[in-house]
Image (spheres, rainbow, N blue to C red):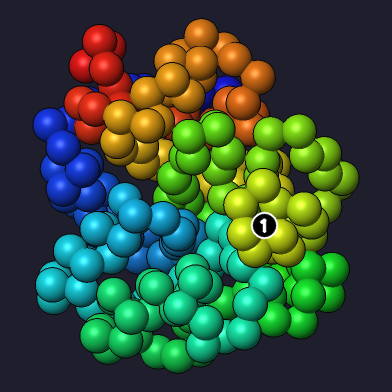
């Protein structure tokens, strides 16, 4: 099992630029070797910078497939859904086959949505690249501290989230880890203590991620602190 590689950059836009280059290169290799590129997307402010930069590229998306690491149980047109943000900032501005965009039907509720998405995910694993963020409490996707999930499930319902909305759907740790490349983007001073706890092998959800190829953590100087 690969370890963690820490990469520090001056600011959040620089982190996003590095992520964009890694995504485009992973896509090139996957399409060249297997004919398709399966990418898991994240919500949050730092991934949003990535999507805005990708919207300005001239990539050929005809062989890309898009998935979500997690989603909030809101109506599809709710601006707080990850899918809404990703569409608004990137996918709606690019020539992408609609059948290649695989959203979580979170409006159906956590349990039904998790069940349906698990059937889809099971047929495509391993992913080519999973991109995640990390919260100030060390959560990733919608896997929060203190929550326990059935580790036999690929996709899990989430109740009583410490952040609104209370109900969500998330890929499980083992599912997020079944990827050829795993990127975690962390920016901002508010993440610094969680980064240090992760480095110190603290009991954080993000620390439960594993990847055979290793995990690449892209940090800005504010999040890295003295470790930059």
Left of 149 or right of it: where is 23?
left
Q: Nearer the viewer, residue 65 or 185?
A: 185
Q: Quadrant of residue 174?
A: top right
Q: Position of residue 210 (x, y in %)?
A: 59, 31
> From the image, which quarter does the C terminus lie in?
top left
Q: How many marks?
A: 1
> From the image, which quarter does the N terminus lie in?
top right
Secondary structure of the residue carrying numbered label 1: strand
Q: Position of residue 121 (x, y in %)?
A: 67, 65
Q: Which residue is mark 1?
A: 170
Q: Position of residue 118 (x, y in %)?
A: 75, 66
Q: Nearer the viewer, residue 4 or 223?
A: 223
Whether 219 is drawn above or below 125: the answer is above
Q: Quadrant of residue 49?
A: bottom left
Left of 147 or right of it: where is 16?
left
Left of 171 or right of it: where is 67?
left
Specify whether residue 126 is in view: no
Q: Quadrant of residue 24?
A: bottom left
Whether 65 is drawn above or below 148: the answer is below
């Amino acid at each position: 099992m690969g370890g963690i590689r820490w990469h520090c950059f001056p600011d959040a836009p620089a982190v996003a630029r590095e992520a964009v280059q890694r995504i485009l290169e992973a896509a090139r290799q996957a399409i060249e070797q297997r004919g398709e590129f399966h990418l898991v997307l994240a919500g949050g402010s730092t991934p949003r910078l990535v999507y805005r930069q990708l919207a300005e590229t001239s990539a050929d998306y005809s062989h890309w497939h898009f998935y979500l690491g997690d989603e909030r149980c809101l109506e599809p047109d709710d601006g707080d859904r990850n899918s809404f943000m990703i569409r608004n900032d990137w996918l709606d501005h690019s020539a992408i086959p609609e059948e290649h965009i695989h959203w979580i039907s979170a409006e159906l509720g956590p349990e039904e949505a998790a069940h349906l998405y698990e059937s889809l995910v099971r047929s495509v694993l391993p992913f080519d690249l999973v991109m995640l963020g990390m919260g100030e409490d060390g959560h990733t996707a919608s896997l929060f501290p203190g929550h326990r999930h059935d580790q036999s499930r690929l996709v899990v319902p989430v109740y009583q989230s410490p952040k609104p909305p209370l109900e969500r759907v998330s890929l499980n740790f083992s599912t997020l880890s079944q990827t050829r490349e795993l990127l975690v983007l962390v920016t901002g001073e508010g993440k610094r203590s969680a980064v240090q706890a992760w480095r110190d092998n603290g009991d954080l959800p993000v620390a439960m991620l594993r990847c055979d190829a290793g995990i690449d953590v892209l940090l800005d100087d504010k999040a890295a602190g003295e470790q930059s």
